[in-house]
Image (cartoon, rainbow, N blue to C red):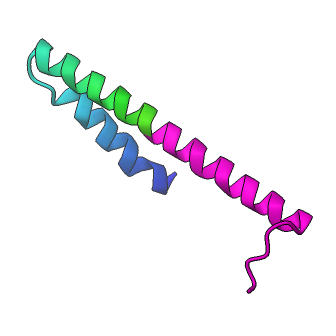
């Protein structure tokens, strides 16, 4: 719980400190687009790691050279 407390507090502060409605909507849109981009990058990294590990297990790729 100790490691997740700071991100939760920061997330709540980000939404509570927004000023007017226009800035709030722009901030939320930027936050959602940022989360989508991070999710896509994380998915690409996961697929690459999975694929490389599979190639190493099958003996097609040898990184020990």
Camera-side residue of 18 and 61: 61
Residue pictured at 65% horizontal, 53% vertical? 48
Residue 36 x, y percent position in the rendering: 44, 31
Residue occupying the far top of the picture: 21
Residue 14, x across and y down, in percent: 24, 34
Relative to 21, residue 32 above or below = below
- Measured from the top left, where is residue 22 in percent x and y? 12, 14
Dominant SS type (magenta)? helix
Relative image position of residue 11 (x, y in whole percent): 33, 37
Q: Is residue 54 left or right of residue 48?
A: right
Say which quarter of the image contains residue 29. Answer: top left
On whether residue 46 falls in the magenta region, the answer is: yes
Determine whether 10 is above or below 20 in the image.
below
- In the image, 2 versus 22, the foreground residue is 22
Residue extending furthest toward the right: 58
Is 41 magenta? The answer is yes
On screen, residue 56 versus residue 20, left or right, reads: right
For residue 53, what is the image quadrant?
bottom right
Total tally of numbered discs in the picture:
0
Question: Can you say whether 58 is above or below 11 in the image?
Answer: below
Look at 51% across and 38% down and name the residue there: 39
Furthest toward the left, the residue is 20
Question: Magenta segment range?
Answer: 38-65
Front position in the image: 41 or 6: 41
Q: Quadrant of the C terminus?
A: bottom right
- For residue 42, side relative to residue 25 (left or right): right
Name the residue located 67 percent from the left edge and 47 percent from the top edge.
47
């Amino acid at each position: 719980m100790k490691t997740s407390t700071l991100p939760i507090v920061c997330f709540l502060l980000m939404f509570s400190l927004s000023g007017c409605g226009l800035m709030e909507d722009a901030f939320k849109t930027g936050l959602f687009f940022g989360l989508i981009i991070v999710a896509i990058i994380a998915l690409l990294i996961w697929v690459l790691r999975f694929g490389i590990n599979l190639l190493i297990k099958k003996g097609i790729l040898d990184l020990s050279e």
